[in-house]
């Protein structure tokens, strides 16, 4: 599935950011927090706290590429204008959210 070739630039950028850049930022942020623990000034504590909060905020966005890829894959298999009807042997669809 080549998103750039198919003209789906926005989805390709989102997948790139979510699968490469966000985990890289998380890794660098956590490395900074770990490496700077020996410095005990008030400013460094605030910086570490800020970096840790940013890492926590961007963490869930790393799964966005999985969601988009799964949904676009499902749409691609059914195809535009067609109905995705299940056959008699299809397993039942269960809710994955206990909402």
Image (spheres, rainbow, N blue to C red):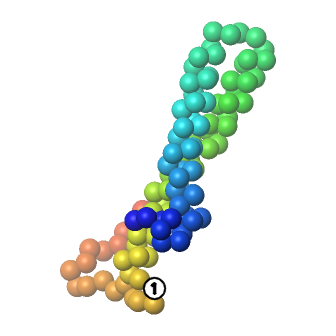
Looking at the image, which residue is at 57% across and 36% down?
26
Name the image quarter holding residue 34: top right
Horizontally, residue 23 falls left or right of residue 91, namely right
Front position in the image: 30 or 12? 12
Q: Is residue 91 above or below residue 81?
A: above
Q: Is residue 61 above or below residue 81?
A: above
The image position of residue 53, as x and y in percent, is: 67, 34
The image position of residue 52, as x and y in percent, is: 64, 31
| Mark 1 element type | loop
Looking at the image, which residue is at 59% across and 37% down?
25
Name the image quarter holding residue 36: top right
**Disc 1 target residue:** 80
Viewer can see residue 99: no
**Quadrant of the image for the N terminus?**
bottom left
Front position in the image: 5 or 54? 5
Looking at the image, which residue is at 48% across and 60% down?
67
């Amino acid at each position: 599935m080549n998103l750039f070739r198919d003209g789906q630039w926005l989805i390709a950028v989102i997948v790139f950011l979510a699968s490469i850049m966000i985990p890289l930022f998380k890794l660098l942020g956590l490395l900074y927090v770990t490496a700077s623990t020996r410095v005990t000034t008030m400013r460094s504590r605030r910086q570490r706290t800020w970096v840790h909060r940013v890492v926590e905020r961007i963490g869930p966005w790393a799964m966005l590429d999985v969601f988009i890829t799964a949904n676009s894959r499902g749409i691609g298999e059914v195809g535009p204008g067609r109905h995705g009807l299940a056959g008699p042997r299809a397993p039942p669809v269960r809710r994955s959210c206990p909402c």
